[in-house]
Amino acid sequence: VGKQLDFDYLAKASSAATWSRTNGNGAQKVAFLGELGTFSHKACIQYFGEKMAVEFKPSFRAIFEAVKSGEVKYGVVPLENSLSGSIHENYDLLLEYDLTIVGEITLRIIHHLIGRPGATFEKIRRVASAEPAVQQCRQFLECYPDWQIVTVNATASAVREISCCEDQSFAAIGSKEAADLYGMAVIEAGIETDPRNFTRFAVIAAEPGDKSECKKSSLVYSVGNQPGALFETLKIFQENKINLVKLESRPIHGRPWQYMFYADLEADVAAERFAPILAALHSKTEFLKILGRY
Amino acid sequence: VGKQLDFDYLAKASSAATWSRTNGNGAQKVAFLGELGTFSHKACIQYFGEKMAVEFKPSFRAIFEAVKSGEVKYGVVPLENSLSGSIHENYDLLLEYDLTIVGEITLRIIHHLIGRPGATFEKIRRVASAEPAVQQCRQFLECYPDWQIVTVNATASAVREISCCEDQSFAAIGSKEAADLYGMAVIEAGIETDPRNFTRFAVIAAEPGDKSECKKSSLVYSVGNQPGALFETLKIFQENKINLVKLESRPIHGRPWQYMFYADLEADVAAERFAPILAALHSKTEFLKILGRY
């Protein structure tokens, strides 16, 4: 099945312009994780502007489902943070669902320690946030080993939670926007381990975008178990002067210590010059799927 | 500094036999995460036998600290699971601390849904476990979206917690050993997403082991930001017929979208034939550190 997927993709790409006309504006909505004031929400605004209709979802899978069913036209999901690394669940979902990446967003992430108005450092006993935010603030949190860490779905949910309970020992890690939204106070600003903290989000859709030329493409593939098999695929990129900007491996279920490789390329896989490269990749892979061009 | 580290390593390796004699048996203990009945504990027994003295630690960092300070001779930390992927915190700690991998352990992981005696499926409202266990049972847990998931440090801690509170709606995910240890009941056995579920652990120590020949070695390195730089290093392995069994990337703090590469090789980096390979790697890397041979 996998072997055919990328040809399906190229056929779809050519009819994408038609598709977006016939499907009208009914589903012109974008889904993201959590609620208002999350970094995903900020990423949506950066990409689509303030006027795009939004839809909150409780999990990444629910976002993929909403895009698949046509409930929304787009989803925005984080793929990678420059401090804490990849968000693997979304890599796994990109493989599982037959959706496609149509855009990417890079967002500067600044985390604040947020408390109820009047809360002070000394009173804090418990801190709520999302797991990636906790990782990005690990150096700061290691200075307070007695604080209990509570992980929730999204940073803005943590800020909303502390706004609901009248307990000044309960703090959150989240954005300035979330603190303002819920009338909470910033106790300490910029607590991420390094200020050069960025998250890269993917914009996903059911059908390829209608851009005629793209700068980047994403692929996922597996190779056989023989030594040097991964190298053979990278050699193809190298020989064709295709810049590989990211290579991520994820385990394959049921085949211990074998991996799916996710590759981000500075190339348009739908370009004519890419056709022989794709053919060469086919001959060196067991499974190959184009995840999108953008 | 990095450029010198591997030569330091090779010098240390040759004096390792002397070191282990002069340091006696006082610190002949192994530290692992959590408490009795965790999978880390099981890995310790598999490697060192039942008689080795053990020391529980509340975090992976605490294990690295205990080995560094000489409080214990060895630490056992999980590196990778065949369903959920790498445990990145330990990759980051291997880079940060100047310790070395002296052995590896592969353990079959079977997860059980565990409750208080008399607990039934229908009563469950809340499930506690460690984050990797939750990931490895994701397919099972997705069938019960109403269950609240509580993450704790180690699977055995979750089982102990449910044994302490008299609430039949509170269940845990953990090992058969932990259920037996705390007199709890297995409600559903083998709930991991795929039965071919293994975790690979590293045995870490302050000084290299005294094995004269090793089958595997681990390295970490960074390359420049120019296209093809990673490829150049992989080419060295390929040309020298060195089998690369794992390649993992982790972000470098303060240098967004640049990565440290962790490579596991089927080769002994202390072998004479490896010297020119190491020299070639030096010329193609910005930073290079040997993490161990085993």
Image (cartoon, coloured by chain):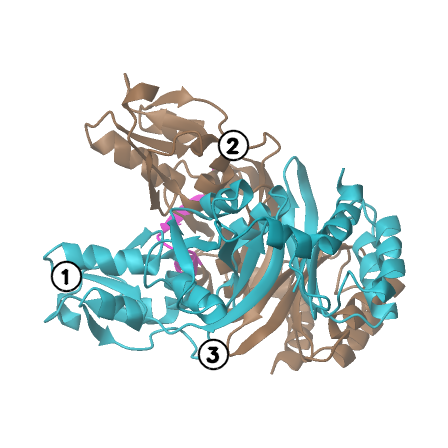
Chain colours: A cyan, B brown
For discs 3 and 1, the disc positioned in front in the rendered view: 3
Query: Badge 2 local density, few (<14 within 10 Å), some, or many (20+)?
Result: many
Let me know if residue B283 is in the magenta part: no
The answer to which image quadrant residue B8 occupies is bottom right
Give the extent of the magenta segment: B51-63
> x, y percentage for residue B195?
59, 29
Q: Which residue is denoted by mark 1 in the rendering?
A: A169
Query: Badge 1 local density, few (<14 within 10 Å), some, or many (20+)?
Result: some
**Mark drawn on residue B192:** 2
Q: The disc labelled 3 sits on which kind of residue? A: Arg
> x, y percentage for residue A126?
21, 58
Where disc 3 sits, the SS reads loop
> Relative to residue A232, is residue A106 drawn left or right?
left
State how far apart marks 3 and 1 are (Cα). 30 Å
State how far apart marks 3 and 2 are (Cα). 38 Å
> Relative to residue A5, is residue B218 drawn left or right?
left
Where disc 1 sits, the SS reads loop
**Mark drawn on residue A196:** 3
Q: Nearer the viewer, residue A244 or A204?
A: A204
Q: The disc labelled 2 sits on which kind of residue? A: Glu
State how far apart marks 1 and 2 are (Cα). 37 Å
Question: Label 3: chain?
Answer: A
Q: Quadrant of the C terminus of chain B?
A: bottom right
Q: The disc labelled 1 sits on which kind of residue? A: Ser
The answer to which image quadrant residue B26 occupies is bottom left
> x, y percentage for residue A179?
24, 68
Residue at image x 32%, y 69%? A175
Q: Quadrant of the N terminus of chain B?
A: bottom right
Mark 3 vs mark 2: same chain? Answer: no
Q: Nearer the viewer, residue A73 or B152?
A: A73
Question: Label 2: chain?
Answer: B
Is residue B37 depicted above or below A89 in this figure? above
